[in-house]
Amino acid sequence: MNEAGDAMTDDRQPVRDDGTGPGRTRLFLGGALAAVLLAVIGASGGWVLAGEPDRPAASSGVAPSGGAGTSGPPATPSAPSTRPADDRPSGPRSRTPSGLTVPDLVGADFARARQELRDRRLGWRLVFGAGSGRAVERTSPGPGEPVKRGVTVTVWVAGPAPAVTVPDVGALSCADAADDLVEAGLYPRYRSGRQGPVTGQEPAAGSAARWNDQIALTCGDAPTASPSPTP
């Protein structure tokens, strides 16, 4: 019994710490763990105090290149610019001389109608019909329509073209001969230019013709015969 009691007593005796037992090992591990925790807390505190330099910057609302989109509001399209008046294209504008219109010629004698057009410096073209009489049936452009100087007015006449006599223009310049032919209701046709005196006409002077017929004129000095070569 005493041996058993001694054994129990010895088992309850405090363990003597000589620096090599299990108590020393537990103390060493606890100190190391505490040091690690203090290091982590210190580092965290330093990161907070340093302004968190390693944290990602907050989004500025601008998508990086190649990004899918942004969290900011969509860009507002700019209003279209208004071009100043001085920068607008400008060009010539069509104008009709004020007061110049086609006279009312319907029912008038075609010769008088032609003279009225000439007085207004307008051209004319007579179209004779198959009816009877010299009256104007219609015109194009019509009466009262605004026109520019030099515009040709077509005049339709009820009856056929009257007969006229070809005037003699052989002693005139080519320009004066043309005027006389037009005055007579005929039209000149030039064989060899329009300069110089008239040296020939066809049909000949005094021939019968009708209004709107053409008279062929030969104008210019007649070529001189070259001298024959001397033997």
Image (cartoon, rainbow, N blue to C red):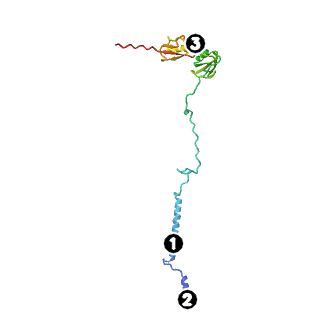
The quadrant of the rendering that contains the N terminus is bottom right
Whole-percent x and y of residue 139?
A: 62, 20
Give SS at disc 2: helix
Asked if the residue at tag 3 contacts the one at tag 1, i.e. Cβ–Cβ closer than 8 Å, the answer is no
List the residue tagged with mark 3: 164
User: What's under tag 3, amino acid-wise?
Assistant: Val
Looking at this view, name the residue that lies furthest to the bottom.
1
Q: Which class describes the residues within 10 Å of circle 2: few (<14), some (14-19), or many (20+)?
A: few
Which of the two discs, 1 and 3, labels the residue nearer the N terminus?
1
In the image, 189 versus 2, the foreground residue is 189
User: What's under tag 1, amino acid-wise?
Assistant: Leu
In the image, 170 versus 175, the foreground residue is 170
Asked if the residue at tag 1 contacts the one at tag 2, i.e. Cβ–Cβ closer than 8 Å, the answer is no
The quadrant of the rendering that contains the C terminus is top left
* Residue at image location 54% in from the left, 14% down from the top: 181
* Residue at image location 55% in from the left, 87% down from the top: 4
Q: Which class describes the residues within 10 Å of circle 3: few (<14), some (14-19), or many (20+)?
A: some
Of circles 1 and 3, the one toward us is 3
Of circles 2 and 3, the one toward us is 3
> Mark 2 to mark 3: distance in Å?
181 Å
List the residue tagged with mark 2: 2
User: What's under tag 2, amino acid-wise?
Assistant: Asn
> Mark 2 to mark 1: distance in Å?
40 Å
List the residue tagged with mark 1: 29
* Residue at image location 51% in from the left, 63% down from the top: 43
Give SS at disc 1: helix
* Residue at image location 52% in from the left, 66% down from the top: 38
Specify the label residue 225 is tagged with.
none
Q: Is residue 205 left or right of residue 146?
A: left
> Mark 1 to mark 3: distance in Å?
145 Å
Which of the two discs, 2 and 3, labels the residue nearer the N terminus?
2
Give SS at disc 3: strand
